Image: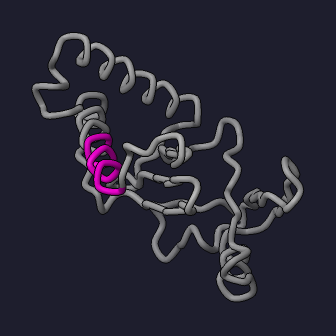
Amino acid sequence: SSYNPHLPFQSPLWSMEPRLFAMETAIKGKRRYVSAHLGRFLDHYWRERNVHDRHYYELIRENTPCRLYFDLEFHKQSNPHLTPSVTEDLLTQLFNELGIQYERSYDISIQRCNMVDLDSSTSKKFSRHWIVHLPDGHLFSDAREAGIFVKLLVKRLEEETGSGMLQERGHA
């Protein structure tokens, strides 16, 4: 049976609906796939995987509800002006603009605690992964709807950059 957030004593961890996860292998472009129930996968991930081999990600299936997610990456050597403090300031600005877009589009207020912020950076590459957990368990109906939301965000930022509104809010 599928997880129903409105029924008591259920946890999405023990949903019987299988999930699909992938892990990149040492061979470039190759992936290993695992299909498992979320609770069993997490049990394996935390208890049995070496801490250095925890590079899985969940595949979001078509027409499946999802959270908004961002993979934020850049090559450090090509961007020496993006120091850690500058990068953190830019991430804060991005989060604030994301919050404005949620307010305008859905009348939903988000805080930084609504976001899982995973840091996979190395000495050569900046790599952060954001997953937004909306209040009350709200989800996008699918990845397409999440993409439309991001396109609205980008369009607004382009327009506000052109009009000077973004700079008035103190953004670079």
Q: How many marks?
A: 0
The answer to whether residue 113 is above or below residue 29 is below
Q: Where is residue 96 in the image (x, y as percent from the top left)?
A: 24, 42
Name the residue: 72% across, 84% down.
50
Name the residue: 30% across, 62% down.
113
Q: Can residue 62 be seen in this view?
A: yes
Q: How is the image coloured?
A: one colour
- Quadrant (top left/top right/bottom left/bottom right) for the C terminus: top left
Residue farthest to the left, as pictured: 168
Name the residue: 63% across, 42% down.
64
The answer to whether residue 101 is above or below residue 152 is below
Would residue 88 be counted in the magenta stretch? Answer: yes
Q: Position of residue 171 (x, y in %)?
A: 20, 33
- Quadrant (top left/top right/bottom left/bottom right) for the N terminus: bottom right
Main SS category, magenta section: helix
Q: Where is residue 25 in the image (x, y as percent from the top left)?
A: 84, 61
Residues 139 and 47: in front is 47
Q: Is residue 151 left or right of residue 172?
A: right
Name the residue: 69% across, 72% down.
54
Q: In this view, does 91 lie to the left or right of 38?
A: left
Q: Is residue 83 left or right of residue 13?
A: left
Q: Quadrant of residue 32?
A: bottom right
Residue farthest to the bottom, as pictured: 47
Q: In which quarter of the image is residue 150?
A: top left
Residue numbers of the magenta segment? 84-94
The answer to whether residue 47 is above or below residue 2 is below
Residues 46 and 106: in front is 46
Q: Is residue 71 visible?
A: no
Residues 56 and 142: in front is 56
Would residue 72 be counted in the magenta stretch? Answer: no
Q: In which quarter of the image is residue 39?
A: bottom right
